[in-house]
Amino acid sequence: MSDASEGGEPESAFESADAVVVGCGPAGAAAGVFLARSGLDTVVFDRGTASLDRCAFLGNYPGFPAGIDVETFQALLRDHARETGCRLVDDLVQSVERAGDADPTDDESADPADAPLAVETQDGRRVVADRVIAATRYTGEYCRPLTGDAMFEAHEHDGETHEHVDPDYADADGRTPVDGLYVASPAGQRDVQAVVAAGRGAHVARTLLEDRRVERGYPVDLARHYDWLRPDSEFEGEWGDRERWREWFDERVPEDHDADDATLDDLREEYIDDAFDTRRSADEVADLTDRGHQRLLEHLDDDAVLERAAEIEAGRTAANDPDGDAPDDVPAGDAPAGDAPDGGGRSEGASANRNH
């Protein structure tokens, strides 16, 4: 399938994925990031009216002390989704239905409710997936072929009757009466404001991941998903021993759990593998930090970056030559180390830390 950045026609009329997310605003992007980081082949469709387009400037999203312009924020959302492995596609979803409804088979005994979901788009793409997350605040009309009228409620405005998605159609975790369909947005007051919507999208994605793991045989208490990288220190002592993890896992398996022993053995080892895969050394954390900073720089205004770099360089020069009497022919930062005051290194480090 062609990525949005590649353009052109879809590579084929049919694609498959583990999950599809409709919308790449805060809710959709967060959902896509959580799904893709968990290893799911995730397609995110991103075209249509976005509620953020009505925002002049985003001032209350944590992590941006002076706020952030909407265009840069939206670019960061899309880039984050791509970085984690989402297939981001610039296309408008027109319908979601059971794949069996569109592709009748000779197997009359098959339960249509067990068929995967087929997502069809404005540009003629078709993606079949086991699960779909709706994350489009202004419309859910594309779900009507799947849900019928049950997903919608009528209201009057200026003497005219309009329909919109019933905010109570999905439960607080995003599950709907339709197997495989989840709703991150619209969700009433649970997805208003950008940061709330992002949390909603992440929560619904975690619900989807939990349901998927339960279907595979995980006990409910062990099916909940936590995306959390751990330092080496978390695996010191007994928690560096796989046998201790096996004991911990078995303590949480209920006596009436119906998975056979072989399946449970496989799930136990998979769970432990996943836990150890979150381990990061100090060097790995440093590499991740450097990459995170570099990727963020790509989205900043070039002139602002150059201006800040000049300020940093001036600060370093002043730290190396506090009396201002360095020879003119000595490049900035090349003054003899012995001439620097004891605090010179700390001043430089403080300046660099502010930049991060």
Image (cartoon, rainbow, N blue to C red):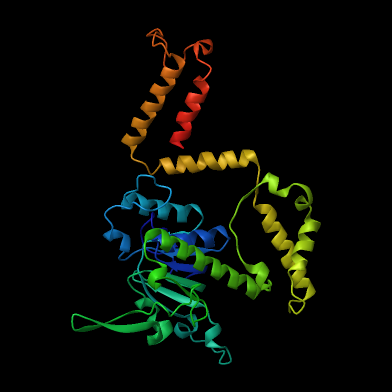
Place of residue 128 in the rendered image (x, y in percent of width and height, measured from the top left):
49, 73
**Splitting the image into 4 quarters, where does residue 120 fall?**
bottom left
Q: In the picture shown, does residue 349 fall above or below 336?
A: below
Residue 114 at what x, y percent from top left? 56, 83
Vertical position of residue 66 compared to residue 255: above or below: above
- Residue 39 in the image: above or below residue 93: above
- Horizontally, residue 247 falls left or right of residue 55, namely right
x%, y% of residue 299?
A: 38, 44
**Residue at the extreme left of the image, as rendered:** 158
User: Could you tell me which residue is drawn at 34 percent across and 83 percent down?
Assistant: 153
Q: Nearer the viewer, residue 87 or 248?
A: 248
Examine the rendering and report whether any part of residue 324 can be seen: yes
| Residue 81 drawn at (x, y percent) | 46, 56
Q: Quadrant of the N terminus?
A: bottom left
- In this rendering, would 79 be left or right of 84? left
- The residue at the far bottom in this view is 108
Look at 32% across and 60% down and name the residue there: 52
Residue 129: in sight, yes or no? no
Given residues 266 and 318, the one toward you in this image is 318
- Please give the count of numbered marks on the rendered protein: 0
Front residue (pair 94, 31) = 31
Say above or below: 74 vs 20.
above
Q: Residue at x 38, y 59 (%)?
A: 194
